[in-house]
Image (tube, rainbow, N blue to C red):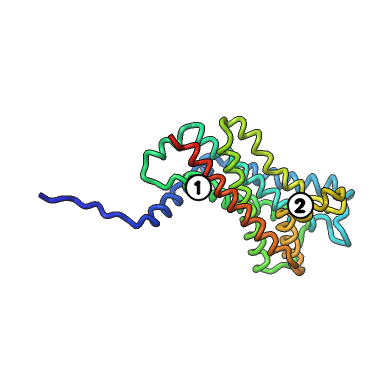
Amino acid sequence: MTVAVQRRRPSRWWVVSDYYEMVTRSLRHLAADPDQLITVTLQPVLTLALMYFFLGGAIQAGTSRNYLDFLLPGVFIVMAGFAAITTATGVASDMVQGVVDRFRTLPMSKPAVVAGHVISDLPRSLIGLAVTIVAGLFMGFRSPAGVGAWASVIGIVLLVTFTLSWIAAVIGLLGRSLEVVQQVSAVIIIPVFLSNALVPTDTMPDWLRVIAANQPLSQATDCIRALLADAPLGDHLLLALVELVGITIVAFVAAALLFRRRTRR
């Protein structure tokens, strides 16, 4: 009698394959429904135009800096927040519509389902970033930054997107209905408006200024402004990395625990 032996790949390769499949699944949904890109392209551009043309004359960005030079890096962070919102609705949709239950019957890494939504936000964020940069250039933005500085800017924006997307995943796992998650997911944008992304902290009350100036999104925005102005980074980069990575770890653990609880029978 001949017994067929199935050759198994190392488990780590199975995990990598599972994550890859879930990411490509989310990207296929994006290709099938390009309207999802409206959130990360149209809304940041509208924010940039409205803030600059309607409020720019009333807001002093400090010293002689053009308000557009101050504003555009902040809109990059706004765009990252809009990109992350899609993770909340995507995760909630999978949970509510029973997609996760079908995946549970397969020999696959279960956290890959959530991680696929989070990771797929990164290329979506890149598209939004490119559109926002082009809009800024049309409005007159110019930067002396070199290729390395621009690469660092992209890295910071992707890190912010990654962090906010894990927070969005937690929101998606907490919601019991898609409608509730769609309404609540907008809270991801609130920290952006409680930062120096769009207005200088000098215009804020003292109690709010302390919070806004030291929160991670403000540190990330200050990093981007310094990089694009070819100015010293100071301690903003270190603080941004430490705070964003720390929040990401906490959100990842929370999402993993919530996913395990939601899928436990």
Image point (76%, 52%), residue name = 197
Residue 122 shown left or right of residue 190 in the figure: left
Residue 102, x across and y down, in percent = 41, 36
* Residue sitting nearer the eye, 120 or 215: 215
Q: Is residue 137 visible?
A: no
Disc nearer the start of the sequence (2/1): 1
Mark 2 burial class by Cα count in 10 Å: few <14, some 14-19, many 20+: many
Q: Which mark is residue 136?
A: none
Look at 64% across and 42% down and name the residue there.
38
Residue 40 vs residue 93, the one in the foreground = 93
- Residue type, numbered disc 2: Ala
**How many labels sit on residues?**
2
Residue extending farthest to the left is 1
Q: Is residue 117 left or right of residue 85?
A: left
Label 1 SS: helix
Quadrant in the rendering for residue 145: bottom right
Q: Are marks 2 and 1 in contact (CB under 8 Å)?
A: no
Q: Report the disc number at residue 197.
A: 2
Disc 1 marks a residue whose amino acid type is Gly
Residue at image mark 1: 116
How far apart are the two marked residues, 2 and 1, measured between alpha carbons? 28 Å
Q: Position of residue 214 (x, y in %)?
A: 76, 56
User: Depth check: 234 or 86 in front?
Assistant: 234
